[in-house]
């Protein structure tokens, strides 16, 4: 066997890359697997970084996707602290930050995303933080506690979760959002307003329509955020949570088509038959939504695409498309979203928002259920997955009727 025969190289050892390595073995891949990650840790889960980990309710081992010993046991050559620096597609080799090069028969790009940075005066001050890695979360955790003040720029999921965790740690929190509501890019207005109200009752100050002008510092450390209208939010730490940018540069430099993510098909293939891309670094078609291209940033998507790539590499049939879903935990609220909440002609409430247990059904104009946003409503979430997968049509009266169970609605 030549050096490069049957060698899968996975660039990026996060949720998608780590899962792909394990799935390749599960699906019977007997060739070599090299998993290369620039972070010092074996693959770990990011969701707890803004939730249980930040609140000090999870230990380091519980973050890991699999125990560290798993990789050697499964003959996966895990190289942490190493960056893939280039791809030579003609020679089918990657170059690494330690100067080595590696041949591959299949290359899987699982490069993730990085926090979006905004050009703001003061953004290099100490205490200006972002949240993507375990190291970031440790820094944020160290800045929180009774009497501390956290300002969060960006009212997306990560910002709101961090604010909720800050409150749990006794810190004060202010969320500064440029749009007229939090979660503006990802949730419907009813859900945004529900979360705003819930945060306010928990003592979080939410500022909407608020444009940040600069970060204010003293002695090299941030002390506040100045808004365009002259107001100043005092803070001991500022978390900038304004979205993430796909790590697509390696692919772009290798000539692979990218457009807000590495472009892949429904089996995680790029334009090059030897190269796959999975997880947050990709933009992929969504079969349930007319193959519209979308960049999903979620664990279920990372797992789905890891399965697609592993199946294709092992010569197995392509797995059936899954319904996209996402979750967020804030205080005592568990939000679960199934489907993509866009383009709804009508949004119908099932349940009682005042009881903190309800679901919002997004309907197309022909009644097809496009998405369900469920808060503390596990039945609606699970039934919603079946309904969205089947592209089932429902009418608003059926949805509102609590005497009909979700099993009946999904049947
Ligand atoms: C704070 C936080 C909370 C979240 N909460 C949720 C949630 O509640 N629910 C949910 O579904 N999703 C959540 N997500 C999103 C979820 O974690 C991501 O969708 C998931 O991690 C994507 O996996 P990935 O492997 O594509 O990317 P990542 O997990 O980011 O892994 C990519 C890895 O590749 C490495 N890398 C990049 N370039 C190179 C290179 N050139 N060479 C080597 N290595 C490289 C990166 O350092 C990183 O370790 C959250 C994310 C964050 C940050």
Image: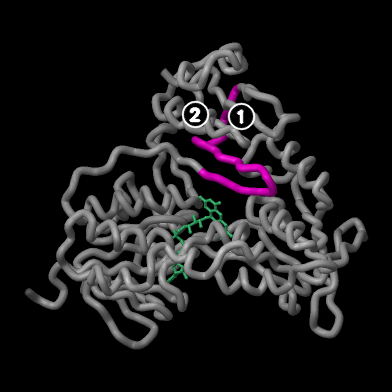
On the image, numbered disc 2 is attached to which residue?
Answer: 384
Dividing the picture into quarters, in which one does residue 114 lie?
bottom right
Q: Which residue is painted at 21% across and 56% down in the image?
A: 313
Q: Where does the magenta region start and end?
A: 326-345
Give whichever of 103, 173 is nearer the camera.
173
| 329 is within the stretch colored magenta | yes
Q: Is residue 247 visible?
A: no
On the image, numbered disc 1 is attached to which residue?
Answer: 359
How dense is the environment of label 1, judged by Cα within 10 Å: few (below 14), some, or many (20 and up)? Answer: many
In the rendered image, residue 338, in percent from the top left (x then y), is placed at 51, 36
Establish whether ligand 1 lies closer than 8 Å to the Cβ of label 2.
no
In the rendered view, would you say 310 is above or below 223?
above
Q: Is residue 171 visible?
A: yes
Numbered disc 2: secondary structure: helix
Relative placement, left or right, of 182 versus 250 is right
Please say if the residues under marks 1 and 2 sit with CB atoms less than 8 Å apart. Answer: yes
Give whichever of 74, 368 is nearer the camera.
74
Q: Main secondary structure of the magenta part?
A: strand
Relative placement, left or right, of 400 versus 72 is right
On the rendered image, what quadrant is the N terminus found in? Answer: bottom left
How much space separates mark 1 and mark 2, taking CA atoms? 9 Å
In the rendered image, residue 405, in percent from the top left (x then y), is placed at 52, 18
Q: Which residue is painted at 77% across and 68% down in the image?
A: 145
Relative placement, left or right, of 46 versus 141 is left
Residue farthest to the bottom? Answer: 99
In the rendered image, residue 210, in percent from the top left (x then y), is placed at 82, 52
How dense is the environment of label 2, judged by Cα within 10 Å: few (below 14), some, or many (20 and up)? Answer: many
Numbered disc 1: secondary structure: strand
Give whichever of 213, 323 is nearer the camera.
323
């Amino acid at each position: 066997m030549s050096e490069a025969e049957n060698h899968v190289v996975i660039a990026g050892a996060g949720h998608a890359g780590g899962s792909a390595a394990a799935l390749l073995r599960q699906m019977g891949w007997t060739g070599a697997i090299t998993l290369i990650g620039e972070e010092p840790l074996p693959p770990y889960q990011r969701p707890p970084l803004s939730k249980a980990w930040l609140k000090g309710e999870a230990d380091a081992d519980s973050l890991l996707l699999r125990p560290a010993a798993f990789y050697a046991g499964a003959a996966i050559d895990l190289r942490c602290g190493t960056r893939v620096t280039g791809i030579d597609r003609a020679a089918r080799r990657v170059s690494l930050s330690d100067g080595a090069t590696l041949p591959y028969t299949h290359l899987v790009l699982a490069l993730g995303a990085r926090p979006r940075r905004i050009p703001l005066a003061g953004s290099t001050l100490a205490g200006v933080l972002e949240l993507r890695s375990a190291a970031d979360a440790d820094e944020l955790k160290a800045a929180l506690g009774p009497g501390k003040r956290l300002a969060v720029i960006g009212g997306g999921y990560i910002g709101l979760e961090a604010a909720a965790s800050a409150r749990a740690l006794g810190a004060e929190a202010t969320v500064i959002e440029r749009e007229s509501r939090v979660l503006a890019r990802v949730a419907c207005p009813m859900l945004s307003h529900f979360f705003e109200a819930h945060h306010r009752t928990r003592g979080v100050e939410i500022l909407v329509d608020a444009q940040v002008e600069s970060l204010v510092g003293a002695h090299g450390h941030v002390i506040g955020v100045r808004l365009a209208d002259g107001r100043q939010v005092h803070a001991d730490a500022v978390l900038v949570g304004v979205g993430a940018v796909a790590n697509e540069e390696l692919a772009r430099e290798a000539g692979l088509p990218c457009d807000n993510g590495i472009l892949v098909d429904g089996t995680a293939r790029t334009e090059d038959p030897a190269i796959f891309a999975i997880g947050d670094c990709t933009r992929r078609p969504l079969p349930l939504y007319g193959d519209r291209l979308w960049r999903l940033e979620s664990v279920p998507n990372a797992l789905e695409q890891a399965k697609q790539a592993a199946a294709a590499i092992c010569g197995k049939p392509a797995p059936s498309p899954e319904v996209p879903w996402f979750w967020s935990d804030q205080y005592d609220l568990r939000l679960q979203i199934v489907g993509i909440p866009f383009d709804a002609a009508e949004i119908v409430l099932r349940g009682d928002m005042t009881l903190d247990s309800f679901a919002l059904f997004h309907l197309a104009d022909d009644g097809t259920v496009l998405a369900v946003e469920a808060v503390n409503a596990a039945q609606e979430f699970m039934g919603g997955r079946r309904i969205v997968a089947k592209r089932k049509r429902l009418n608003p009266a059926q949805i509102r009727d609590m005497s009909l169970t979700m099993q009946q609605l999904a049947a």
